[in-house]
Amino acid sequence: MCAPFVNHCGGYDKVGFIRKDIYNQEVCMRKQHTSYASGALKYLHDLCKKDPMMYVSYTVGEGSRLQRLFWCDAESQLFYEVFGDVLAFDATYKKNKYLCSFVVFSGVNHHNQTIVFGVAIVADETEETYVWLLEQFLEAMKGKTPFSILTDGDLAMRNAITRVMLGVFHRLCARHLFRNALSHVRDKQVLKWLKKLMLCDFEVIEFKKNGKEMVVTFQLEDNSWIAKLYEKRMKWSPTHLRGNFFAGIWTTSRCEAFHAHVAKYVHL
């Protein structure tokens, strides 16, 4: 950090500060960020005094730095009690100055409007973090589990759901799958076939036939991503999702739209 200043000013004696001053400033900034976390926790705890059903839970890591924070109010809990059959679960990827992920638990009501069941801020996206989040979510919702849950397919999320919400049907977001397909398959014709398999409701035999025909036609026998995608077909293919309830939700784009809405008012 010193080098650019030295080069710009033409020597160490002309910079106006020494290396130790940078370390001192860094310590001050860390303390300031810690105070931001303390202020957020105080605000949430003050809300608990006004809202007896308000649920707040958090953990701290090394140096007493906030590591995980989950909260939901009475209205969110009541929404989940009525409309919590389907849960969409999504996280942004550290798009703020604190490099923390913003997690949203959402669903839809009887007017097909997006409703929020709970939100969280986490410092990492490990399996243990998601396990903790789901455990806090279930505790806040008095142990009620949804019938179905949608995620973007993140491995840590999938493993956490298997550990905490055993028996809940897990569907993968079609939008994320297609986005991944764009980076693994460059041929536009293949993408058209994949899109058809992801969105059309074929009979099982017809689905297998179309899948094999696509692989043979475009010589995808050695494409490991296509092979893994087919292995997960029970989680994304409409053909194999029959009999499961999703309340019309097939992507986590509602969560992403909520992220964008929050960004209008919270500038971090």
Image (cartoon, helix red, strand yellow):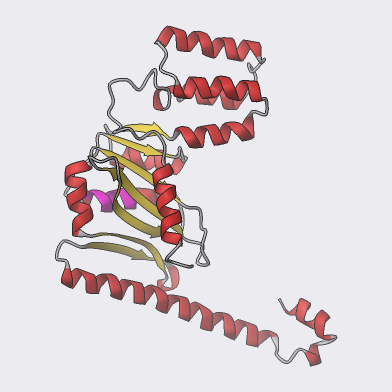
Q: Describe residue 100's horizontal placement relative to residue 144 as left or right.
A: right
Q: State the residue at coordinates (52%, 59%).
A: 95
Indicate whether 35 appears above or below 120: below
Indicate whether 59 appears above or below 193: below
Horizontal and vertical percent position of residue 41? 31, 72
Indicate whether 63 appears above or below 86: below
Q: Which portion, as a residue range, is magenta?
A: 131-138
Q: Residue furthest left?
A: 52
- Location of residue 184 by image quarter: top right
Quadrant in the picture for the N terminus: bottom right
- For the stretch drawn in magenta, the main secondary structure is helix
Decide which of 189, 10 is in the foreground and name it.
189
Decide which of 139, 218 is in the foreground and name it.
218
Q: State the residue at coordinates (42%, 27%).
A: 236
Q: Describe residue 209's horizontal placement relative to residue 106 as left or right.
A: right
Horizontal and vertical percent position of residue 177? 51, 33
Whether residue 133 appears in magenta in the rendering, the answer is: yes
Horizontal and vertical percent position of residue 28? 52, 83
Q: State the residue at coordinates (48%, 35%).
A: 175
- Location of residue 52 by image quarter: bottom left
Decide which of 161, 8 is in the foreground and name it.
8
Horizontal and vertical percent position of residue 9? 81, 85
Q: Residue furthest front?
A: 111
- Location of residue 164 by image quarter: top left
Q: How many marks?
A: 0
Indicate whether 162 appears above or below 13: above
Decide which of 185, 163 is in the foreground and name it.
185
Whether residue 42 appears in magenta in the rendering, the answer is: no
